Image (cartoon, grey):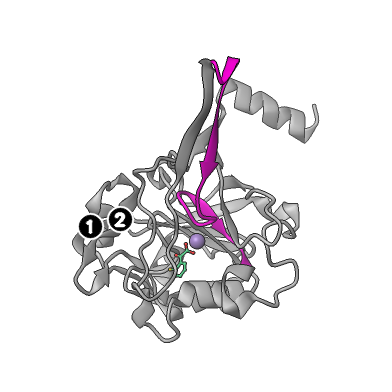
Amino acid sequence: MSKLEALAADIATGAVQIVDLTHTLDPDFPVIILPPEFGQCARFRMEEVSAYDHRGPAWKWHNISMSEHTGTHFDAPSHWISGRDVPNGSVDEIPVDAFVGPAVVIDCSEGASQDADFELTPDVINKWEAEHGEIPADSWVLMRTDWSKRSGEAYLNMHEDGPHSPGPTPEGIRFLIDERNIRGFGTETVGTDAGQGSHYTPPYPAHYFLHGAGKYGLQCLANLDQLPATGAVLLAAPLKIKNGTGSPLRVLAMVTK
Ligand code: 23J
Ligand code: MN
């Protein structure tokens, strides 16, 4: 049997399981809210074209619309000013090998349950590596916070001074890029950056440093509590939108029992 046939057989028997890391696209799912002077992200919308009726007697279908950055979605380098000149930086140009690859999960769920502004720092990463080994180059690094279990107001966690949700510090994200050369960084929150990420230098450091270095982002992930710390393989292929800066997508993880 070839390696690929063996993988297909393992999926069929359940020796390799497929975990869905995706939220359902739903008009009620929150989108990021930026300060009012900026343009805003659109929620998911769906309108019925026909439903086995006079508009189409044997078929049902919908027209849908949304932002590139609605729901569980992928961020391309061209999303940020630092990545505007990265070669092949939009979703239609990224080499497709980038869409299949290994993932590690840094469990920050306990810290995030105590502190909505929990920060992923180099210290947190060093402690994780002391237990699980060095983060392999070209890996997705997923920050587990259990934020995906929140719904409604608690998800954005808006206060008078803006949203509060966990994320990496500038030093934390730079360590992952400069010292570990990761492929990308994924979160359960509405951004790869912390809710208060506009107050770091530079503002939104995860976006700034990841995309400037040609790395990718994943946001609004779910079910990270079902993944091992190491050993999962991610399938995360954005829609092929011409000059697209990101895209909603189905994110799947392959894991062994
Ligand atoms: C634009 C400006 C700031 C942020 C974002 C978008 C996102 O989080 C996003 O969806 O990429 S923080
Ligand atoms: Mn985004």
Residue 96 tag number: none
Residue 113 position by quadrant: bottom left
Residue 190 position by quadrant: bottom left
Amino acid, disc 2: Ser
* 212 vs 153: above or below: below
Label 2 CA crowd tier, 10 Å (few <14, some 14–19, many 20+): some
Mark 2 secondary-structure assignment: helix
Query: Which quarter of the rendered picture does the N terminus lie within?
Result: top right
On whether residue 68 falls in the magenta region, the answer is yes
Residue 123 rendering spot, x and y as whole percentages? 38, 75
In whole angstroms, how far apart are the C-alphas of marks 2 and 1? 6 Å
Which region of the structure is painted magenta?
Answer: 54-77
Is residue 255 in sight in this rendering? Answer: no
* Circle 2/circle 1 CB separation < 8 Å: yes
* 182 vs 225: above or below: below
> What residue is shown with label 1?
113
